[in-house]
Amino acid sequence: MNPFARPLSMRVLVLADVALAALLAVAATTSAPSLTVGAASALLCWLPVAVRRIWPVPAYCGALLLSLLVPVFGAGRVIMIAAIALTLYTVSTTQPVRRSAIALVPGLLITGAVLLVMLSGVPRQANGWPDPVFIIGTAWLVVGATWSLGAAARTRREFTAREAERQAEKAVMDERLRIVRELHDVLAHSMSMITVRAGVAAKVFDKHPEEGRRALRAIEELGRDSLVEIRQFLGALRSPGSTPESTPLPGLADLPSLADRAAEAGVRVDLSVSGTVPEPMGLSVYRVVQEAITNVVRHAAPTHCRASVSVVDGLLRISVVDDGPGRRAPPGETAGHGLAGMRERVAMYGGVFEAGPVPGGGFGVSASWEVP
């Protein structure tokens, strides 16, 4: 882990400011004409810098007020400008931009006034130096630049925080949609199969009790398997990202059992599977085929269905075509969430999804996307 990638703690920043203020105070003391004057000027100018992280606005106000006394103690103008600039930077990084912009105005005015007083008693050389306009303009440029840097840092930090919050909300929403989609597929498939098998059991139980018992056993097994899957997804709501190892999610290997259950519900499925896909992608493939076959059971049974899954040259292709009627919703009703859910699953991988009646009768579902 890169230690420089982590933000420094408040305590470390305060200690760094104290060390910086101490070093600059020593420099100011050694450059002063006398020890007494140097110590006084250093204390006046650098004390606000040492506490700027703890009290940003009071430290800046203190730097402005103490700078008015700089001409009295004879401290250097560079020291005064640096103290005002450093404390103003902290204000601009901790306060809203409008408020820090208001704080910038007295900083510029006091800096200019103090420099003008300090330069008024300095005789000019033959070349006109020192030039008050140039020195005051340079000081204003330094103070304004530090305010701009602080405001930019605050704006960038706020944008980063908003973006992180937006990404977190999006991740939560995507996870909820994923779980809802999974629950829909599990419930739609299981309830469709249970309804069909229950209807069969009700019709044949009196004359063919053994066949009725087989239908009831199939309902029991399907219900038990569906409850296991539902518990998995409800558990994911409590502990996101956790999946019990004892009950793995379905994949390509479970497609034959899916075809067998469809056959018991009156839909003969000719299944063809070739190639392999990554484990997380296998769940999406299974759900697309499951939902397509569920629609066949609900709207076209009894009928014949051809389902194929193949991976050739890094391209996954899914096709489910039946011989039943070419519509998937009763007259006067709108289609459910099945087709929309399949389309969303395919879109997650940047694939292409198509569904609709096929020439010659029947309904077809096809999807394709690249496999990494």
Image: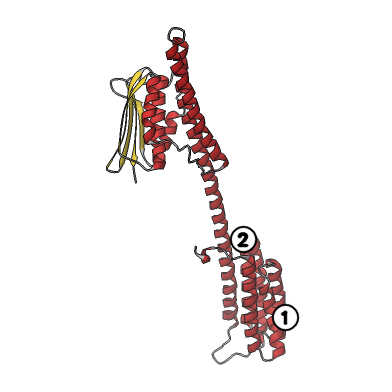
Q: Give percent across and percent down for residue 106.
A: 67, 70
Res. 32 image quadrant: bottom right
Residue found farthest to the top: 207
Q: 168 above or below 21?
A: above
Say if mark 1 contacts mark 2, CB within 8 Å. Answer: no
Q: Is residue 350 left or right of residue 139?
A: left
Q: Is residue 353 left or right of residue 34?
A: left
Q: 349 above or below 54?
A: above
Res. 291 image quadrant: top left
How many marks can you see?
2
**Could you say which is closer to the camera, residue 251 or residue 78?**
251
Q: What residue is disc 1 on?
A: 69
Does residue 28 show up?
yes
Q: Residue at x 28, y 20 (%)?
A: 360
Q: What residue is disc 2 on?
A: 97
Q: 239 above or below 114?
A: above
Amino acid at dot 1:
Leu
Q: Residue at x 69, y 74 (%)?
A: 48
Q: Residue at x 57, y 91 (%)?
A: 125
Q: Give percent across and percent down for residue 187.
A: 49, 28
Coloration mode: secondary structure
